[in-house]
Amino acid sequence: MIKKYGMFINGESIFTDETMPVLNKYTQEAFAEISVATKEIVDQAVEAAKKSYKAPWSPYERFKVLKRVSELLLERKEEFAKILAIEVGKPIRESRVEVERAALTLEISGEEAKRIHGDGIPVEAAPGSENRMAFTIRVPVGVVAAITPFNVPLNLVCHKVGPALAAGNSVVLKPAEVTPISAIMLCELFKEAGLPKGRLNIVTGDGPNIGDWLLANRKVNMFTFTGSPRVGELIRQRAGIRKVSLELGNNSATIVHHDAELEKAAALIAQKSFNNAGQVCISVQRVYVHSKVYEKFLSLLKEKTEQFKVGDPLSEETDIGPMIRVEEAVRVENWVNEAVEQGATIVTGGKREGAFYMPTILANVHADMKVCRQEVFGPVVSVDKYDSIEEVIEKVNDSDYGLQAGLFTSDLSFAMKAAKEIEVGGLIINDASAYRADHMPYGGVKKSGIGKEGPKYAIEEMTEERIVVLNL
């Protein structure tokens, strides 16, 4: 049976005659249908959000709702994990971790709702202002349009919805059309937890159409988006002077210095190159290894990679599932074949079966290859060598992106030099680029975006600072 899911607007489920299938990414068969929003429905969702935003809602009430949803999510962990495995193709063990992290993100967001504060401003220090006092407060921006990607469809929703609600905003959520079910189920938990009607609304269907309608609606005060740089640039252009937070692409680099623990480095890089079939913004894509240890590291990385089991995401034994679409697996296959034609060698992998692309290591690469220059967003990692610290920093920085990078070394001076000179939003020492704790500031530079995630930092993005001056 194919289950039909409606949208969630003003606390109620809304169904439309036009529907869109959601595929089981392993079987490539439809397991659910979602309603397709019209412009009128999108405008209705924004209106509900605007009306709800005007109603009083205290920080402690926000905390209680977010905390309760976090608890409900953990109570239903297996149900949500199974849905993630089906709609994303993410292995079940990895899906459980996403549910746990999503619950933590909401819990942290709830705690941060109680900590929003301003600062005292010593205006009395200015000549002529001796009888004045001043302080700042932080106020919500209003209606936040949240547009989320397919690869982490539960936790990345929580990273936008949690802070937005904690800050006192209302939200119109547009999840990726290929993985919307976990987000719809999350809205049901918010209703069960007592969220006021209209504070969270979800619209589903065609992404470009819904994006256009949201951008055209001047009652939307802020856009928070995770996805491709192309779409991010379009949103920023069309949003005008409204607030925008963008988490965009990357081609993460990780350095392995000659003094690194090679076993540890190989294990972590293998794991963080291929989890979720490489479909993670901070997945390791480029690895730079000191020439003294290059051959040994490459052998270890090959050994670790070939231990992974590729297969059914619902199997407890599976490490790597299918990619999100057959077309994406074909694209990755074409990129790898092009790199080979340009001189790269396949160390392991390099084969496709339907939507599956085998975890692949490339050697003898150069910076102008597509697999090094652009974002692969698939289970492919390229390994290159270097001889000097200055050389490798230059190689890492030779990118349009700058989200996160990794560095394995015991040399503190190298680590500090890298921290100052590598152009990224985050540098991870003695781990791969794909490390993230959900309460840390997360965001990039260059084409990787603007603004920060992590509940405390997202709340700062989703509020306005207002100064209050008292003339005594």
Image (spheres, helix red, strand yellow):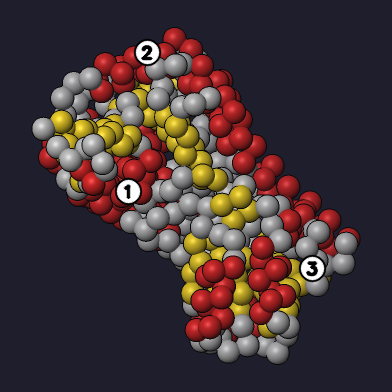
Q: Residues within 10 Å of mark 2 (few under 14, many from 20)?
A: some
Q: Earlier in the sequence, mark 1 or mark 3?
A: 3
Q: Which residue is mark 3?
A: 365
Label 1 SS? helix
Q: CA distance from mark 3 to mark 2?
A: 51 Å
Q: Earlier in the sequence, mark 2 or mark 1?
A: 2
Task: Report x, y in % for residue 172.
Answer: 38, 26
For the question of whether residue 427 can be seen, the reply is yes
Label 2 SS? helix
Label 3 SS? loop
Residue contact at pointers 1 and 3, CB within 8 angstroms = no
For the question of whether residue 271 can be seen, the reply is no
Left or right of residue 124: residue 375:
right
Task: Report x, y in % for residue 224.
Answer: 45, 36
Q: Is residue 239 above or below residue 342?
A: above
Q: Nearer the viewer, mark 1 or mark 3?
A: 1
Labelled disc at residue 455: 1
Q: Is residue 188 above or below residue 15?
A: below
Labelled disc at residue 44: 2
Q: Residues within 10 Å of mark 1 (few under 14, many from 20)?
A: many
Q: Nearer the viewer, mark 2 or mark 1?
A: 1
Task: Report x, y in % for residue 268.
Answer: 51, 74
Name the residue type under label 1: Pro
- In the depicted view, which residue is nearer to us: 131 or 69? 131
Q: How many marks?
A: 3
